[in-house]
Amino acid sequence: MMSFFKTVGQLIQNNSAEIAVDINRALNNEYHSLLHEGGLSNDIANKRRAHLVGLIGRAILNQNGTDVAEEVTDWTKETARVSVEQGIEMEKLIIILASYKTTIWKYIRKEIEIDQIKSSTVLAVHQFIEDLLDQILYLFNATYINYYKQKIASAKKAFNEVSFPVVALSDKVAILPLIGELDEERASIILENVLPKCKDLKIDELILDLSGVPRIDTISANTLFQLKDSLAIIGISLTFTGIKPELAVPMVNLGIPINKLHIKGTLKNAIATSKVL
């Protein structure tokens, strides 16, 4: 049995590039279009496939998947990262990885007279390849999902950052129009981004227009009051405008005296009484 493992492992290692090409041939035109759209050439993809096939061959040769575990992990991380960046769906990648099983085994059958080998020995090698590729697939899935979550989080953060435009109306006054539901996460991003923007503009007053906010929770309302206090520390006053009845309730529930806030009913009124001119 050991000699058959070595024979198969050596065969796969020595012919990894050829097996990679066979895997490429087995893929349909849709996948090749995805590669082209993502800016990835077949040559680059084949080199990456050949590298993994070579690692699989080495593991079979040594009958030990842990020998290549670190390199396989690096391969899955890089492949998952590139796939997420290029927008290649995980479902398609799973199909591709699954094709390694059939392609590698077809190659073994083509090159080795396995009918002459004891069936239990052949099954042992076949099961080893199955288990190894299942482990690689599991690791790839977990890594892909992790990178995908990171990409979504990064995109959401970038979107939130540009969603809070501090627009200068004059040398002294700027306006921050908020649009969309204001949850705890978005409210915290306001603190992170608006303060430095106001400081850079060297304004005296910021008008916070809430007319485009459909609802707000108590935590988010509290964050807005934190923004007011933080701006006051650096010498900038905050004027609230566009507060609808459904927004007023959570603000009142905080117990903050409304008479201590600078509030205008409409943005027009806020601009008219500000230091724009």
Image (cartoon, rainbow, N blue to C red):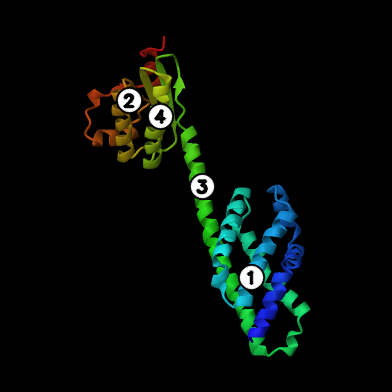
At horizontal 35% and vertical 30% (from top left) the residue drawn is: 244
Q: Earlier in the sequence, mark 2 or mark 4?
A: 4
**Cα distance between the residues tagged 2 and 4:** 9 Å
Q: Earlier in the sequence, mark 4 or mark 1?
A: 1
Residue that numbered label 4 is attached to: 194
Q: In the rendered image, which quarter contains the N terminus?
A: bottom right
Query: Label 4's element?
Result: helix
Disc nearest the viewer among 1 and 3: 1
Say if 231 sits above or below 27 in the image.
Answer: above
Q: Residue 137 at x, y = what percent?
A: 58, 66
Q: Counting other residues with Cα less than 10 Å from the Cα at mark 1, is it few (<14), some (14-19), or many (20 or more)? A: many
Q: Earlier in the sequence, mark 3 or mark 2?
A: 3
Residue that numbered label 2 is attached to: 231
Residue that numbered label 1 is attached to: 56
Residue 25 visible from this viewpoint: yes
Q: Residue 33 at x, y = what percent?
A: 73, 52
Residue that numbered label 3 is attached to: 152
**Cα distance between the residues tagged 4 and 1:** 52 Å
**Cα distance between the residues tagged 3 and 4:** 23 Å
Circle 4: residue type: Val
Circle 1: residue type: Ile
Circles 3 and 4: CB atoms closer than 8 Å? no
**Cα distance between the residues tagged 1 and 2:** 60 Å
Mark seen at residue 221: none
Circles 4 and 1: CB atoms closer than 8 Å? no
Say if 231 sits above or below 18 in the image.
Answer: above
Relative placement, left or right, of 55 versus 214 is: right
